Amino acid sequence: MAAELAGAVVAFDLDGTLVDTAPDLIGTLNHLLTQEGLPALPLEEARPFIGHGARRLLQRGFIAAGAHLDPEREQGLFDRFIPHYLGRIADESRPFPGCRQALDRLRSEGATLCVCTNKPTGLSNALLDALGMSRLFAAIVGPDAAGVAKPDPRHLEFAVQAGGGSLGRALLVGDSATDAAAARNAGAPLVLVSFGYSDVPVAELAPDALVHHFDELPAACAQLLAACGD
């Protein structure tokens, strides 16, 4: 067991950090676009639209397809989006390369893992259950469970406490400006991954560590948590 990780909590964002959910999210968006008589969007074009919730994904997707959403139409599309997405939640979504191995190593070296995501808790559980990953986490916390959403630091604090830890011995692993702000607001160390859904280069967000593959994550966590002390 690595002393740096013993008793620590490593909190993870979900979409774009642990799991590449873009194919199923954009697949659902394109399903609605085509139902509305609009062109489907290429995956890589729409990928940066992810990360701010389903409503924002719909807004940006429909604008890119040449349509404007008024509030009433947006609500109707949202009500159709969620059940369709739930029905295909892990058809194509997969953990990023090296994810499972890194999580196993962190746990074997004494860390407790939790999920701190702006994806609703029910959808998060459904996704991780379908991928056989739920057992790896002591807590899976969406904004509905925490009562607030990232970047509010209380979301991260709630998730860490639900995992049995405290912010003084925790860090956040994410992929976006929302994650960066949540960690900074909470005074927690921040690791960002370069392969997620950020619409700005993640290096510009000044993380404490930037990793390009999950193979790099355990060492980065150990280094940052060693600096936290006991």
Image (tube, grey):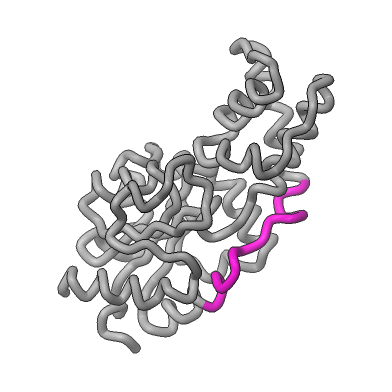
Task: Determine the image quadrant of residue 154.
Answer: top left
Estimate the x, y position of residue 157 in percent, counting from the top left.
30, 51
Identity of the residue drawn at 47% across and 48% down: 117
Q: Quadrant of the C terminus?
A: bottom left
The single residue placed furthest to the bottom in the displayed view is 1
Is 95 in the magenta? yes
As drawn, 227 above or below 152? below
Identity of the residue drawn at 46% across and 81% down: 105
Between 197 and 53, which is closer to the camera in this rendering?
197
Task: Determine the image quadrant of residue 207.
Answer: bottom left
As drawn, 111 above or below 79? below
Is 99 in the magenta? yes
The single residue placed furthest to the left in the displayed view is 229
Q: Is residue 230 left or right of residue 157?
A: left
Q: Is residue 143 left or right of residue 82?
A: left
As drawn, 222 above or below 174? below
Between 189 and 147, which is closer to the camera in this rendering?
189
Identity of the residue drawn at 30% across and 80% down: 6
Total count of labels = 0
Estimate the x, y position of residue 106 in percent, counting from the top left.
42, 77
Q: Quadrant of the N terminus?
A: bottom left
Estimate the x, y position of residue 56 in percent, counting from the top left.
55, 29
Identity of the residue drawn at 61% across and 59% down: 128
Secondary structure mostly seen in the magenta stretch: loop
Which stretch did the figure color magenta?
A: 88-101
Estimate the x, y position of residue 215 in percent, counting from the top left.
48, 76
As drawn, 136 above or below 1? above
